[in-house]
């Protein structure tokens, strides 16, 4: 569903991109955009595929969907996009892998490589990209991990560093979503297993935990999404559970995460979140 927020005080409905004709019966897991080329990518709960659509304006989809579904996309979950080099990265939970795809062609995608050495890094889900430093970060829900992947050559990705909480109670239990503050060299992870937000130092050397903020009041164990306002140093968490709503966390001091506030409403029970 596309909404127009040109007037943030009066958002309006624009259009719906309907994928049901392709057999889609479940909600989208991830949506990423290349706004300069006007391309939208999405994936769905019941299809091991990535869908590519082009649009002229937000009110009209202009091209037939291109569906990319090779064997390397097994339970694809999070996606991250490098619009400079026109590369799309996908975290594949069931395949324990991260895949790179070249989307520079006008109406297709080309498989580059699948980083499959994730046997000790099961169930990658969340993924975030640092284009300037040629790094991708992916969460491993199965073993409380965060992996840093070198993407200086997208056709030959390699592990750089990994962080492991060591145990469920060590701060990260089933880490799901991850976002970056590249300037402050901090990764922020939503740990759904123990309903926490975790701040990690990714500056250099060993990735290590700075702080964590737990809340059973505002957080739940669903597959939730987080977004970051790096200018104001605020992390936003959206949770679908009753009474959970939208929570803002202050990470201006990443060694001391603190609650700013929460807003809950009967209709505010989402799983996906975007900031404008």
Image (cartoon, grey):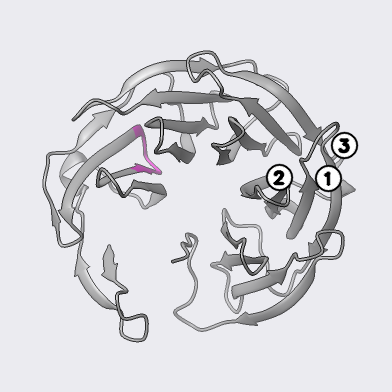
Q: Residue at x 48, y 76 (%)?
A: 268
Q: Which residue is mark 2?
A: 174
Which of the two discs, 1 and 2, labels the residue nearer the N terminus?
Answer: 1
* Residue found 88% across the figure and 47% down from its top: 170
How far apart are the alpha carbons under marks 2 and 3?
12 Å
Contact? badges 1 and 2 (CB < 8 Å):
yes
CA gap between label 1 and label 3 equals: 7 Å
Q: Is residue 112 magenta?
A: no
Question: To which residue does mark 1 refer?
Answer: 168
Q: Residues within 10 Å of mark 2 (few under 14, many from 20)?
A: many
- Mark 2 element type: loop
Q: Residue at x 82, y 37 (%)?
A: 207
Q: Nearer the viewer, mark 1 or mark 3?
A: 3
Q: Toward the viewer: 125 or 202? A: 202
Q: Secondary structure at mark 3?
A: loop
Front residue of 136/223: it is 136
For mark 1, give the secondary structure: helix
Residue 223 vs 9, above or below: the answer is above
**Label 1 to label 2: alpha-carbon separation:** 8 Å
| Residue ID at (57%, 37%) | 132
- Residue 219 sits in quarter: bottom right
Counting residues from the start of the chain, the first of labels 2 and 3 encountered is 3
Judge whether 19 appears above or below 86 on screen.
Answer: below
Tell me where the magenta segment starts and ends, as one range: 42-49
For residue 166, which numbered disc appears in the image? 3
Picture coordinates of residue 224, whole percent (x, y): 57, 57
Q: Residues within 10 Å of mark 1 (few under 14, many from 20)?
A: some
Q: Classify 27 as above or below 2.
A: above
Tell me, yes or no, whether the highlighted magenta stretch contains residue 48.
Answer: yes
Left or right: where does residue 31 sit relative to residue 204? left
């Amino acid at each position: 569903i596309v909404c127009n927020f040109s007037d943030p005080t009066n958002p309006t409905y624009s259009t719906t991109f309907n994928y049901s004709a392709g057999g889609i019966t479940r909600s989208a897991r991830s949506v990423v955009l290349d706004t300069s080329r006007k391309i939208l990518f999405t994936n769905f709960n019941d299809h091991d595929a990535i869908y590519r659509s082009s649009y002229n304006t937000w009110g009209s989809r202009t091209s037939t969907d291109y569906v990319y579904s090779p064997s390397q996309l097994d339970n694809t979950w999070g996606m991250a996009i490098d619009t400079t080099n026109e590369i799309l990265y996908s975290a594949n939970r069931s395949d324990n892998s991260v895949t790179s795809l070249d989307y520079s062609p006008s109406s297709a995608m080309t498989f580059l490589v699948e980083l499959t050495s994730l046997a000790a890094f099961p169930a990658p889900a969340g993924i975030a990209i640092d284009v300037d430093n040629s790094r991708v970060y992916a969460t491993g829900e199965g073993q409380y991990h965060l992996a840093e992947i070198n993407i200086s050559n997208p056709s030959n990705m390699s592990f750089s560093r990994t962080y492991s909480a060591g145990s469920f109670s060590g701060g990260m239990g089933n880490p799901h979503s991850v976002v970056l503050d590249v300037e402050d060299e901090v990764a922020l992870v939503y740990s759904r297993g123990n309903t926490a937000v975790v701040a990690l130092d990714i500056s250099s050397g060993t990735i290590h935990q700075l702080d964590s903020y737990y809340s059973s009041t505002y957080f739940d164990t669903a597959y939730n999404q987080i977004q970051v306002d790096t200018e104001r140093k605020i992390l936003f968490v959206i949770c679908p559970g009753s009474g959970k709503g939208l929570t803002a966390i202050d990470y201006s001091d990443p060694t001391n995460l603190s609650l700013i506030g929460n807003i809950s409403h009967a209709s505010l029970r989402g799983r996906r979140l975007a900031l404008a």
